[in-house]
Image (cartoon, rainbow, N blue to C red):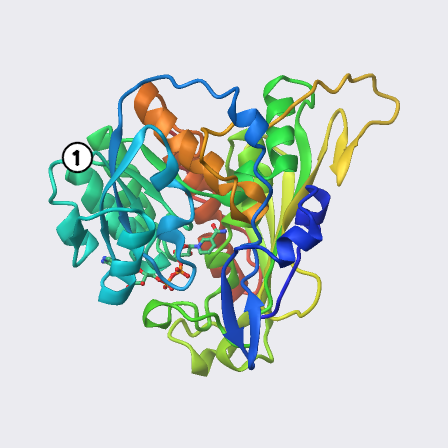
Amino acid sequence: MESAITRRSLLAGVGVAAGAAALGLRETAMGQDVQIQGFEKAKTDTEASKRWKPISDRKVRVGIAGYGVCKFGAAFGFQDHPNVTVAAVTDIIPDRCAELAKVCRCDKTYPSCEEMIKDDSLEAIFVATDAVSHARLAIAAMRAGKHVASAVPAAFGSLEEAEALFKTVKQTGRKYMMFETSYFHEDLYMMREMYRLGLLGKVVYAEGEYYHFMREPIDSYKGWRIGLPPQWYPTHSNAYYVGVTGMSFTEVSCMGIPSIIEHLKPANNRYRNPFGTEIALFRTADGGTARMAVSWDTPGFSGEMGRIRTQRGTFYDRFATEGMDIKVPPIQRPPLPPGVEAGGHGGSHGYLMAEFIEAILADRKPLVDVAQALAMTVGGIVAHRSALKGGELLKIPQFAL
Ligand SMILES: NC(=O)c1ccc[n+]([C@@H]2O[C@H](COP(=O)([O-])OP(=O)(O)OC[C@H]3O[C@@H](n4cnc5c(N)ncnc54)[C@H](O)[C@@H]3O)[C@@H](O)[C@H]2O)c1
């Protein structure tokens, strides 16, 4: 893992010094103490928090599962939200479970997520376990009557799993939200709001990238990151279309590039994956197109980012129009509840958690609902299939609510 200050975080005004000195996550690689990409904490606007208005005085009882290498269970600030009680936590590895309990100031622990979801006092579960188990645990939790927030991706390389997740959300009526961090990047937030206001017209072309060099894979539960097909982890880049329009991809042709990195050779990983970089060209639901790249094996400039060209203007680092007359309204991310930090990944963590809790309290659909979660995830699963077939154009199953 190399140390990285992303271009996106620079553009978002996240201070370099603040990033480098941050309280973010660190690991040791090649004898050096380095920061895991994306965990540089953004500055929290505490003044804005004073404008935050509670919509309820109720507390949602949340159970949190998973405190792995990214310490994700505690990274979104559930423990700091005024409308949340973190009522139980779990990690299969006892030391991690104990640390998660301490960080979340929670007394109740369970030996596994499977055990925790039997706790009738819990209303919602945050699944921050390994990517392989997200869909299985989310489904089990919803069947047990809980609302679910899940780390990305929603499903792991399996269309059947995606289908089962979708059916479960529909059958149980529980809230489901995927915590895709790109959704609350400052630029993507602005694109989405302008799109919703009808200021942009159609998105003609979107492009997104998730560049994360992994000479050695980051540590992971039972080694799920070793040789991971790039487009099985597609949500950070795909968000730069789905997270703007709320729509899906309908077909894809994807080029995979065989890797020289050891764990990304097919003989060296459980996925028989030969690719370290996969570049997908999608047809979008509204007849536009998108080029989405995921790369593990190209060192250098890294990040989670994207751009859009629309009928009325273009976001390339900033919004630009030529020959058009568009007034850009002042758009800012909403205030966070007092005590909740914006957090890592472009200052997105606190916003995602607050959105999930608000959706429960207001009994409304969360922003990144199951349809959008699967639009981002499934597009990548089919893209990897296409790459294995030399770029064959393949149809993508649709999961519309
Ligand atoms: N920007 C982002 O959105 C972003 C960034 C980093 C990680 N992630 C996602 O967050 C998740 C966690 O990442 P990580 O690197 O910490 O993963 P990891 O593999 O290091 O850790 C997973 C943890 O889950 C625990 N676990 C597994 N099954 C469990 C069960 N049934 N019950 C209780 N605990 C269980 C394991 O013991 C382990 O500690 C991953 O799915 C990853 O994809 C997202």
Report the front residue among 375 and 92. Answer: 92
- Eyeballing the image, is 245 above or below 56? below
Q: How many marks?
A: 1
Q: Residue at x 56, y 42 (%)?
A: 347
Q: Is residue 346 left or right of residue 8?
A: left
Q: Quadrant of the N terminus?
A: bottom right
| Residue 237 locus on image (x, y percent) | 58, 48
- Eyeballing the image, is 165 above or below 366? below
Q: Residues within 10 Å of mark 1 (few under 14, many from 20)?
A: some
| Residue 190 locus on image (x, y percent) | 64, 29
Q: Residue at x 35, y 55 (%)?
A: 158
Q: Is residue 226 left or right of residue 119?
A: right
Residue 206 occupies quadrant = top right
Ligand 1 is found in the corner quadrant, namely bottom left
Q: Quadrant of the C terminus?
A: top left
The answer to whether residue 54 shows anywhere in this view is yes
Beta carbon of the mark 1 residue lies under 8 A of ligand 1: no
Residue 329 occupies quadrant = top right
The answer to whether residue 334 shows anywhere in this view is no
Q: Amino acid at mark 1?
A: Gly
Q: Is residue 203 left or right of residue 399?
A: right
Report the front residue among 102 and 364. Answer: 102
Instruction: Report helix, strand or loop for mark 1.
Output: loop
| Residue 251 locus on image (x, y percent) | 53, 45
Q: Is residue 352 left or right of residue 188?
A: left
Residue of label 1 = 145
